[in-house]
Amino acid sequence: MVLQKRLDYGFNGYQVPHMPRATRSARRRRSFKKKHEENQMCAFDLLAIVAGKLLLDKESAPSSSNTSADKDQCAVVNSAVKYEWQDEEKPLKVEACDQGSAARNFFVSDLSQVHGQGCSSKESLVIQNNLNLRLASALTKSDCAGRSNAEKLRNDKSKNDIGTFASKVEGVSSEYREFGDCKLEVETKRAVKDEPGKSGVVLSSTAANMCSLEDPVVLDAKPPALASLDSCAKVPLCRNHIPNSSYPTNQDDVNVVSRDDDDNSSGCTHPITKKKFFRPAPRIGDRRIRKILASKYWKVAPKFKDATVSNSDGDLKPVFHKRKNYYRQQRSERLYPFKKRKHYAYSSPSNLDGGLSCEFVSDSPRKGSNGDASGSCTRMHGVTGASSSFVAQHTSFQPRDSHGMRTFNGGASSSFVGQRTSFQPRDCHVKLRIKSFRVPELLVEIPESSTVGLLRRTVMEAVTAILGGGLRVGVLLQGKKVRDDNKTLLQTGISHNNQLDSLGFCLEPNPSQTPPSLCPEDSPFLLQCDTPDPISRCPPTAGVVCQGICTGSPEPHANNLGNCIESDHDSASSPTDTSMDKSTNSKALVAVPAMKVEALAVVPAHQKSKQSEIVQRRIRRPFSVAEVEALVQAVEKLGTGRWRDVKLRAFDNAKHRTYVDLKDKWKTLVHTARISPQQRRGEPVPQELLDRVLTAHAYWSQQQADQQFKHQHAETCLLL
DNA sequence: TTTAGGG
DNA sequence: CCCTAAA
């Protein structure tokens, strides 16, 4: 049973930071503008949500609140909201303080969670006024870090009108006008009985979660991720789950100020008393996706058009308004031009497909020695089809549920306990002995004429390339994958007096390069699917490359990593198999998604297959000293603006070095030359070379400046 | 395509 | 290395 409440919130606009005078070039100006457009959208989005929550209290605001009219109340809320953002990876924050507040703290740890502090589950949120809201990243416990760098926006009443705002953002007035005047529908629901695991129910557990353990109040401020595209899916922007709470009102509507220009029914700015649906702020989710999940898939399946997403209890009747979807989509695409993120080898069905089949086919002798290879190869082919739709599927739905599920897995209390336990002074130590890791299969091609030394280096390159970023270590406990990184060892069951032979490790794809959205549990639909086997819960594409290792794990979940290390050492006439794969115990472990495909078939067939866009990130190939030497020499001769010529001159036969690479390398060389030797990393470049780099760089920079000066001089002469 | 520069 | 606006 769910009690719900809706309200509208009209947002009046926000102020754009001044563009620094120092922004000279048009490019920088664009960059600045772009950045702030985005940030503002985010800031606004967050603000809107938070402010929407503030409005929750409006109706029950005490008389001391010195306003009674809805309009004024809104204004009060508006003026009380401060928000700020931080760039890039740092968390976005919204603080909203009503006068004399501090009684309540809410931590919007991510977009799907609002953790209440100091509020009891028995106390209706509606009764709570004087809110003090803060929005912080789920990843950070403290919101202090980097604060000084944060740009702040103050909600200046005098600049509160859309026109002023819009005029401050050149070129985007229409969108912003439309956006800035949008309204937010906040729908809160309280389930008397929540069932964790059902969609939408979120148990909070993050480091930032400071709420009381006994009664965590969790607002599921759902980012309207599902709606970011063309979807008209009805999605609750905000739900409020308070177990065992006695919510006083049921579906009461709140009077709010409407400033919706686009709404024909109102059309002007005045307080209205009217039930309104609201458009959720869409891009918070976007940003989250991009920043945290690094996934740019961001489409909802049209199948959800006008659909009601509800959990099996049917107690969630999300509401999402269609209005302005078109605009949202446009903005979404324009301001947040998420391109489909390229997938990486191990996350890409097509890559696995192509890479493996090609290797295994052409390399028949080895198959004999390693029956595993062909086997897994075949299996991968089998998986490919399913996993591709699977991928598309899941990427559509991560925003809320990725967090939801993650936290669900973790569990609110356990996380809290984890924090506590980690503070315990006496910390027993677990002693592990990992005898060795087996490196995933490497495939190296090298000409017969190469020296052994080159072979060694090539293999080394391949190894470091894999270990450098392509892999991470997974932890298996009694064959089950331990996913929660935040749990303590003790919590997980790894203790000094435990039998540690049940502990295993595996090499697996680096999640930073594998969109986490691929994880089945990130999908709401997976919740309905039975995937009891922890292994099969691996992303199919990732599970395929689970690499067994030998740390006494009773179940060496092993598989071959179809890593095809291309070594373009130009002439690949006679491939030599230098695969170090001598595994005898590697059991192929292929995770075929055990879910019902039809349940996942929310991605329409006409949706362009992502596979066509899946591109493997190029393998990292550090420049050798010899290459640096060649580069320096070429640049000394040709200058810094002719990278194509440099390429042709010095790297013509190094196919894997593009002129962009050379330019980048030069960039880093210059940087390297300028920093202290202690700060340098990687293979040391002889100082002599670095000196030449600096010299050449200075010289050609001067040349360029001179050129430019001459140009300008000529122009002015012409003008005069 | 190539260059330039931010990420 | 990637991405992309501009040229």
Image (cartoon, coloured by chain):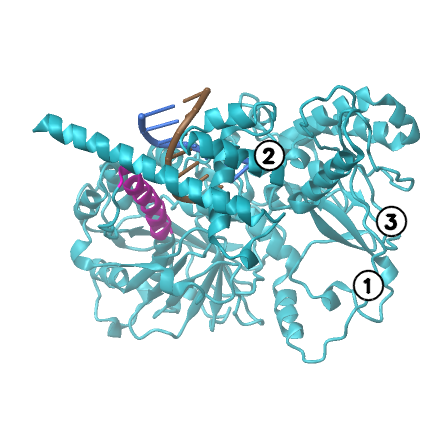
Chain colours: A cyan, B brown, C blue
Q: Is residue B7 shown left or right of residue A97?
A: right
Residue that mark 1 sits on: A432
Q: Nearer the viewer's eye, disc 3 or disc 2?
A: 2
| Amino acid type at mark 1 | Leu
The vertical placement of A215 against A47, above or below, is below
In front here: A74 or A95?
A95
Task: Write the residue at 83% across / 45% down.
Answer: A557
Q: How many marks?
A: 3
Where does label 2 land, which residue?
A617
User: x, y (%) of residue A346?
Assistant: 68, 36
Residue A555, label in figure: 3
What label sits on residue A204 in the rendered view? none
Q: CA distance from mark 1 to mark 2?
A: 34 Å
> Where residue A585 appears, x then y in whole percent?
91, 42
Amino acid type at circle 2 is Arg
Give the quarter of the figure containing the N terminus of chain A.
Answer: bottom right
What segment is highlighted magenta in the picture?
A: A25-45
Residue A44 part of the magenta-drawn span: yes
Q: Residues within 10 Å of mark 2 (few under 14, many from 20)?
A: few
Q: Residue at x 72, y 80 (%)?
A: A426
Residue A206 at x, y percent in the picture: 56, 62
Q: CA distance from mark 3 to mark 2?
A: 32 Å
**Marks 3 and 1 share the same chain:** yes
Query: Circle 1 — which element?
Result: loop
- Asked if both marks, 3 and 2, belong to the same chain, the answer given is yes
